[in-house]
Image (spheres, rainbow, N blue to C red):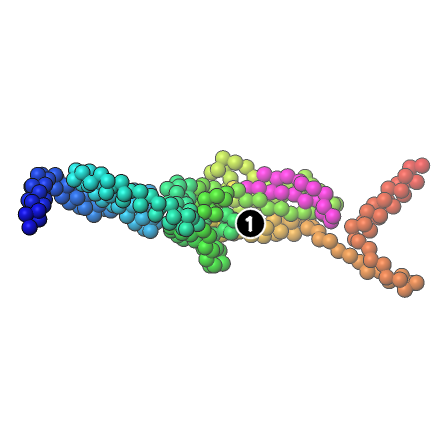
Amino acid sequence: MDKVIEKLELWRDVFIKNIPNMAIALVVLVIAYFASRNISSLINRTIGSKIKQKSVRDLVSRIASGVIFLLGLYFAMTILKFDDTLKTIVSAAGVSGIVIGLALQGTLSNTISGVVLSFRKNLNIGNWVETNDYAGEVIDINLNYFVLKEADNNMVVIPNKIILESPFKNYSLTQEMRISVTCGVEYGADLEAVKELTLETIGAKFDQKKFGKEVEFYFTEFGDSSINFLCRFWIDGERALHRWQAESTAIIAIKKAFDKEGINIPFPMRTLEFVPNNNLNITNNNDKEINKEEEKIKEKEVENA
């Protein structure tokens, strides 16, 4: 009985001796608790304008809140001289963290990628982007995946890790867009007239002066049935819809201008000829025209001779 009393008195003396430390540790824990509770509003005020995704803001707030409380707990245990207990807790937490990290490697990778994407200035919700063979408006960037809304109203869900590791084209970074339209004219057409008419038609439809640029025109190749050309110009736009509208307007304008001036836009044709021996010959119209030209050249040579 005396030993029990001595033990209790010893604990009492230790408790009384550590009352100041316990009071300080309690104050530290209370401060850490309230600081962790109020950190969310502080984070929303400081980084709210930079991170539009609520899920990412909540994650950052929770991480900051947890870190502050754990720091307060660490200081409190240090004040109470629970060094051995603290070392055990830290060691156990470290081992547990490694195991959990290996088990959730893919999920954590997507989560970290989501946080990184949220801080990117060149990628925001509402942008029109093209990546991984998909194009559409960015609807959401959360902790696990990236959501695109395509022009046909389909939703495309892509893991954040793939977006972070893949190149992407962001049409919304600039308010100007260059449009390219290709076409072809018959071999007998006046190429200088074609060029002049195309430049005039596109220039009238799309004002290039405000961009400080001019309509570009280039003949590109001798095609199977036409001489092909490329026409490029600039418009105000940042979405794929603006590109399609401009391309459609340019194609209609060029076709009307060519029809008015009698310029043909050829397409490959084949002619079926029935000869007296009942054999069926398939002749390419382009080859037929070339043969006619060769015959004319031979006739001129004979006349000159």
Is-magenta flag for residue 183? no
Q: Nearer the viewer, residue 155 or 113?
A: 113
Q: Is residue 242 visible?
A: no
Residue 80 locus on image (x, y percent) = 16, 40
Q: Is residue 300 visible?
A: yes
Q: Nearer the viewer, residue 279 or 141?
A: 141
Q: Residue at x 83, y 45 (%)?
A: 293
Seen as rendered, the residue at the extreme bottom is 278
Magenta residues span 216-233
Q: Is residue 255 left or right of residue 272?
A: left
Q: Quadrant of residue 275?
A: bottom right
Residue 239 locus on image (x, y percent) = 47, 49
In the picture, which quadrant includes the C terminus? top right
Q: Residue at x 61, y 52 (%)?
A: 256
Q: Nearer the viewer, residue 261 or 49?
A: 49
Q: Nearer the viewer, residue 70 or 53?
A: 70
Q: Is residue 297 left or right of residue 155?
A: right
* Residue at image mark 1: 247
Q: Residue at x 62, y 51 (%)?
A: 255
Residue 44 locus on image (x, y percent) = 26, 45
